[in-house]
Image (cartoon, rainbow, N blue to C red):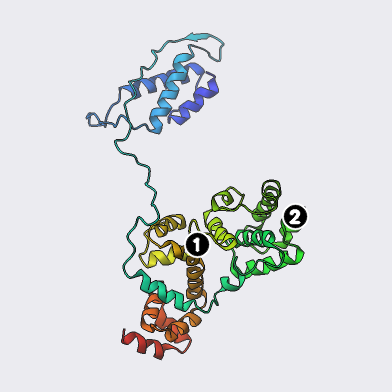
Amino acid sequence: MSYREMQKLCKQSGLAANGTKKVVQTRLLDFLTASSLYEGSSNGLSEKKNPCQVDDRDLQLDRTTTILTTDSTIQDDTTKSITFSSPAKTRAPIPDCTPTSSRKKQKILPGSLEPPKNWEVIYSIVEELRADRSAPLDTDGGEALPERHLGEKVYRFQVLVALMLSSQTKDAVVGETMRILQKHGLTVDNIRATDSVKLNSLIKKVGFHNNKTKYLKQVAEILVRDYDSDIPSTAEDMMNLPGIGPKMAYIIENVAFGRSTGIGVDTHMHRIFNDLKWVNSKTPEQTREQLEGWLPLEKWGEVNMLWVGFGQESQQQKEKIIKKALKSSQPAEALNLLQMVGVNVLKEAKKFDLEHEVQKILKGY
């Protein structure tokens, strides 16, 4: 072992690293000997340690001992040979640490969970509030933007592009960017032929446009090479494409092929379904799995558009959503739902001169 390596080990062990090689070597050996004799706290009591537990200090000491005991001759600064010997550390037999039960989280299967109480009532209220299809995603989302008149392959590719661009980007910006791309020529072959610098300038307003430029170019190459300029027909295969995760894949599959093998869950849905206590999750992916566990399969294709639009309106278009709630067939229940998902109905109603109507409804609720 070199002098520099021993100095490094001293520093890692909290020891001084100065002195000749002999001094540093002796300091390390003394430390290792003391460490091996120490088994417990300062009160002299032995601390029982889980045989299956290995901490960083154990690993560090083992590594140091191994190095020092296998390197028997070291030259000091005067080139005098110093020979030492130290018994190799005998390792105890490795304990059987196989857990008695598997720690792997069990997958939630569709239909395996009990549905939340009265979920259908709340669901029907949202269906009524969203009947006019006037949320931002209804005009600038992945279902509304693609061009059908250019053929099914082009349409499906544009669905994929719209969803890819939508990540970390408002729908209005996605809509503007998609129209710029469509004017440029939004086909697999044209995106493949477009220079990366040019493509990046076309999508510069969307979030993470540099990464998305790279993904679009890579995807175009893959689609030409492996899919005859079409997109994969299953969500599972779509997830193998650069820049496409589960949320996007399930929505693309639904919009492009009219088939739902999973639910695309965004941050609006994640927040709202936790507010409603329909799920108990920390991530959108956990929300997806729990939602699929109880939501009827026939709802999977519509749930994203329905609830993302509701989330957008309840956060970005409060006057409109409150007015729709007041005019609905169940105004009190609709206003209460808005409060459950974080809308301060009375405060917002006051801003829009709707306070009297809202108070009248809520008093009778």
| Residue 333 pos. (x, y %) | 36, 79
Name the residue located 43 percent from the left edge and 84 percent from the top edge: 328
Name the residue located 70 percent from the left edge and 50 percent from the top edge: 228
Q: Is residue 207 visible?
A: no
Q: Residues within 10 Å of mark 1 (few under 14, many from 20)?
A: some
The reply to whether discs 1 and 2 touch (Cβ–Cβ < 8 Å) is no
Location of residue 146 (image quadrant): bottom right
Name the residue located 22 percent from the left edge and 31 percent from the top edge: 43
Of tags 1 and 2, the one toward the viewer is 2
Instruction: Quarter of the image for the C terminus: give it.
Output: bottom left
Name the residue located 73 percent from the left edge and 58 percent from the top edge: 199
Query: What element does badge 1 sit on?
Result: loop
User: As shown in the figure, which amino acid type bears the numbered disc 1?
Assistant: Asp
Location of residue 39 (image quadrant): top left
For label 2, the residue is 189
**In the displayed structure, does residue 40 sit left or right of residue 360?**
left
| Residue 131 pos. (x, y %) | 50, 78
| Residue 364 pos. (x, y %) | 31, 87
- Whether 336 is drawn above or below 270: the answer is below
- Whether 256 is drawn above or below 8: the answer is below
- Whether 182 is drawn above or below 124: the answer is above
| Residue 109 pos. (x, y %) | 39, 52
Tally the marks: 2
Q: Residues within 10 Å of mark 2 (few under 14, many from 20)?
A: some
User: As shown in the figure, which amino acid type bears the numbered disc 2?
Assistant: Asp
Q: CA distance from mark 1 to mark 2?
A: 30 Å
**In the displayed structure, does residue 303 sit left or right of residue 91?**
right
Front-lying residue, 303 or 245: 303
Q: Earlier in the sequence, mark 1 or mark 2?
A: 2
For label 1, the residue is 266
Query: What element does badge 2 sit on?
Result: helix
